[in-house]
Amino acid sequence: MKILAIETSCDETAAAVIGVQGDEPVVFSNIISSQVDLHAKTGGVVPEVASRAHMEAIFPIVEEALKAGKRVSSSASQQKTEDLMKGITHIAVTSGPGLIGSLLVGFNTAKAIAYTNNLPLLPINHIEGHIYSTITNTRQDLENNSSNDGKFPVLALTVSGGHSSLTMVRDHLKYETLGETIDDAAGEAFDKVAKLLKLGYPGGPAVSKYAVQFRDRIVNSELRMMDKSCNSEFRIHNSNIQFPRPLISKPNFDFSFSGLKTAVLTEVLKLKAKNSRSKGSPSGLTAFQKEEICFAFEEAVIDLLVTKTIRAARKYRPVGIILAGGVAANQRLREELKNRIEKYNGEVEEKYKTNFYTPGAGMSGDNAAMIGLSAYYHILDGEKGNWRDANVDSNFQIKNL
Ligand code: KG4
Ligand code: ZN
């Protein structure tokens, strides 16, 4: 089995080749062309601009993935695309959810390749793809870990620009959605706060950078103030700003981020008004004020996500917890979830201890390797992949048990 996978659901044009070694799927290549610079000009994705950019990038990216996937780069660079297709047994493509114009570019490319090469076409759910960006690690790591005898169930916290959910993965391709966002997605909230503070696009990395700067300042000033002879641990002070944690004490697994965004706006207006009253201050926010807002906002989002995840772990006792989606790139979120899982493991009986998995390099944001990995399990499950039956669906929901 050798799968050519394509992903174009939003603003990344991506292609990958997945092969098999032993009975494990292996990523042979994972090529991503990002449209970030293009969308930075408008402060967000303009759907038509995104689809046009996919049109330009799709064939060069597919060719690059095929060449890299051959692992014989010197001769592969001379080969024609039809030769590069030799050995490919399946085509996989994201069929939703996503922007319809963007999805159609990747989907029709995949369909045409499947048709002309007489190959099966597997339509894959993008969110399932994100979950599979870590599930291969989960398999390997669990196999190395003798304290667990089962590979499933795992609990997946999937947080991206268009999606936030907690899902119990009972077995390969067997999902039970525990909760979802009832308004904005976590990544969307990061993007909106960045826009409000004029930090550029995409918002997640920018907000996170400002939050790190705030943390560093506090740590440095605390270090300076600390008595050198005192080696007691110190905690980073919380900021003076405390944002709300909507739904945090509700006994369910749903998320809500839009109130948080409104709270940020209220704080921004309050600080601006305060600045304009004090002589010599800029009319906007100072860099320090922006950093403090980013810090307090990031802490609130992370607290919401991690609290609900640990609550779900207590109820459903997964053997592993996976963090997936674009927001999984957030270092502070990874760190806090890891800490709270360690704390949880310290409190529960041996048999309930759980592992933590995050996507590897190039696998947390949108990519095609995750689509190919997910397709691998659909093929094992017996799916035939007739391109005549496949279609795009911009609201494609993950199938629940
Ligand atoms: O999964 P993804 O690449 O695309 C979607 O499926 O939406 O996720 C993109 C989202 C964006 O909202 C972006 O701001 C967010 O992931 N993101 C981050 C970070 N890096 C990317 N959010 C917080 N911290 C980050 N370091
Ligand atoms: Zn995504």
Image (cartoon, grey):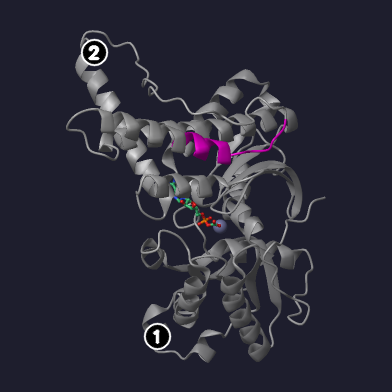
Q: Is residue 128 above or below residue 352?
A: below
Q: Examine the image and state in which quarter residue 74 appears.
A: bottom left
Toward the viewer: 190 or 143? 190
**Picture disc at residue 254:** none
**Picture disc at residue 75:** 1
Q: Nearer the viewer, mark 1 or mark 2?
A: 2
Kind of residue at badge 1: Ser
Tell me if 85 is positioned left or right of 394 in this view. Answer: left
Magenta residues?
Answer: 252-264
Q: Position of residue 69 (x, y in %)?
A: 49, 74
Kind of residue at badge 2: Met
Tell me if 382 is positioned left or right of 119 in this view. Answer: right
Q: Is residue 4 above or below residue 112?
A: above
Report which residue position mark 2 lands on: 226
Within the magenta stretch, is there residue 253? Answer: yes
Q: CA distance from mark 1 to mark 2?
A: 61 Å
Q: How many marks?
A: 2
Toward the viewer: 68 or 239? 239
Toward the viewer: 267 or 185? 267
Q: Secondary structure at mark 1?
A: helix
Tell me if 186 is positioned left or right of 183 in this view. Answer: left
Within the magenta stretch, is there residue 138? Answer: no
Q: Residue furthest left?
A: 280
Q: Examine the image and state in which quarter residue 362 appears.
A: bottom left
